[in-house]
Image (cartoon, helix red, strand yellow):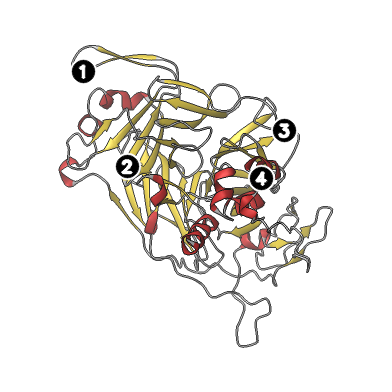
Amino acid sequence: MAPFRRWADLPPDLLCRIGDRLDLKCYASARGACTAWRSALAPPSPALLVLSDARLCPSAASLPTRRSFDLAAILTGARCVGSSNGWLALSIAIYSGQSVFVLFNPVTSTEIILPSLIYESRWVSKVVFSPNPAKDDFAAVAICDIDRIAYVTAGARRWAVLDPVRLVSGDQLADVVYHDKGKVYCLTRCGDVLLLRLPERRRRKPINDEPGPSEPEAPIPIAECALGLRGRRSQYHHQRNLRMICYEHLRQRDLTGPLKLTFCSETFIPYRRLSIGPLEPDLNAPATVEPLLPDSNLPFNPATSFAPPYNTVSAFTNAKSIVLCEGNLYQIWRNASCTVTLQLPGGGHHRVSENEILVLRYYPRRQPCWDAVTDLGGYSMFVGRNNAVSMYAEGVPGLKGNCVYWIGGRGRDQGMVFDMETGRSTPCLPSVGGIPGPLQSTICWYFLSDIMNSSNNSGGRRFYRTRSRSRAERAQDMEE
C-alpha cells in the first residue's frame, strides 16, 4: 500500500488551479497553511479595489495573481474615504445631509459603526484608523475641511474636533497616515508635516444584548441609532444582508421622540433597544499636535525646508502623499495639472511634466531637511485614499521595485505605476479578464495587511506577512 502523502506535497500547478476557485478569505488562509502552499500561491496583495457600474459588489483586482476576488456588497450611496488592513472607512449619508462613518471589512462583512462626528462642515476627505479594529478597541482620524483634524477612540460617544491647524497662507491639509502606537503624520499641500499623538486606546467592556436591571442602558447617538440596524446572523452563520436602509425624517422639535424607519425588501431586527438621549460630553482623552520640524527650522518655509529646485516645485505639485518606509518618512509629490516650466530664483529653468512624481526623504539633521531621492532600495509605495503603504517588491509577482503606485489619470481613475528609473507612468493592469476595464472605476489600493515584519528567509529585507502566515511559519520552525 502506497504511503499517505502530505497535503504539502500537492503539485504546485494543481494547487494553483484549486486556488483559482477560492474566494479571498479562503485563498489567504490556504497561503498560511504551510511553506509549500505559500510558495506555490502568489500573494493576493496588493490589489486594486474596483467597483463596476453594473454591480454593487466591489472586487479586489490582485496584481500578483492577476485575478479578481469578489467582495461583500457596500451600502448604496456609501463613499469610501479610507482603507487599511483589509478594512474600508465608509461615509454614508443618512438624513438632512448628515453622514455616519463605518469601518467595514468586505471579506468578513464585519462592520464597526463609529460615533457621531458633530461639525458644522460635513466634508471629510480622508479617514485613517488603527490596524485590526474592533468594536471595543479602535482609533480613527479624519481630515475635516482644509485645516481641521478630528479623532475618535473606543469608549467615546462622539469625535473630538481639534482647533484649526496653524498653516501658512493658502495652505491646507492634504494627507494623513496612521503609524504605530497612535502616531498620525499629517501632510499639507505646501509640504509641511505635523505629528498627531493620539491618547492610549482604551478597551471597552462588551455590551450585553440584554442588560440587567442594575445596568442602565446608555443612550446612543442619533447617527448610531439610525444605522444600528442589521440582520442578525442566523444559527448557520449566514452572511448578513447589507442592503440599503431608507430613513425618514426625525422630528426636528422633539429629538427624544420615537425614530421612524422604513425597511427595504427585508426585515431587519435591532441589535439592541434604541433610546435617544442628550449627547454626552466628549469622552476622548486629549491628543496633541506638534510640528515635525525641529525648532531650528521653524516656522515652516518651503524655501528653507526643501532643497532647490524642489522649494520652487513644491508650489506646483498639488497632489501630495506621505509614506513611512523602513523607519524613514517620505513625501510623494505629483504634478496633477499640465506640464509647466518653472523659472528658478537663482536662474535657470526646471520642467515638471504632467503626472511626474517626485519622492522626497526627510533628513532631520540636515537643513534643508527634505531632499529628493531616486532609489527606494527595492521598495515600492502605494498612495491614494488608502493608508499609504510601502512594500519590498523583490520576489512578488507583478510588482517592480523603486516605483510609486498611484491612482488617477484622465477620465476614469485607474491604477498607475510610476517608474523612478524611466520617469514615466503606465497602467499597472491591462484591461483583460476580470481586471479593471472601461466599465469599472478604481477606488483605492487594497491590502489584507499593512503590517511589515522581518523574516530570516528574506535576506534581511521586509515583506508583508499575515497572521495565518506567521502562525504557519512558527509551526514549520517547530517541526524542523
- The residue carrying mark 1 is 345
* Lower sequence index among marks 1 and 4: 4
Amino acid type, residue under disc 1 in the picture: Pro
User: Please, what is the three-letter code of the amino acid marked with disc 4?
Assistant: Leu
33 or 350, nearer to the observer: 33
**Residue at the image point whose x is 17% and y is 42% from the top:** 365
Quickly name the residue at label 2. Answer: 329
Left or right of 250 on screen, residue 313:
left
Q: Quadrant of residue 379?
A: top left
Q: Residue furthest right?
A: 265
**Which is nearer the N-term, disc 2 or disc 1?**
2
Q: Badge 4 is on which residue?
A: 15
Instruction: Name the front one of labels 2 and 1.
Output: 2
Q: Secondary structure at mark 3?
A: loop
Amino acid at circle 3: Asp
Say which of marks 3 and 1 sits in front: 3
Q: Nearer the viewer, residue 452 or 444?
A: 452
Give the SS element for disc 1.
loop
- From the image, state whether disc 2 or disc 3 is nearer to you: 2
From this viewpoint, which residue is outermost toward the left? 296
Q: Is residue 235 visible?
A: yes
Q: Within 10 angstroms of label 3, few (less than 14), some, or many (20 or more) residues? A: few
Badge 2 crowding class, 10 Å Cα cut-off, few under 14, some 14 to 19, many 20 or more, is some
Residue 293 in the figure: left or right of residue 355: left
Q: Which mark is residue 53?
A: 3
Q: Is residue 106 visible?
A: no
Residue at point 27% right, 46% down? 292
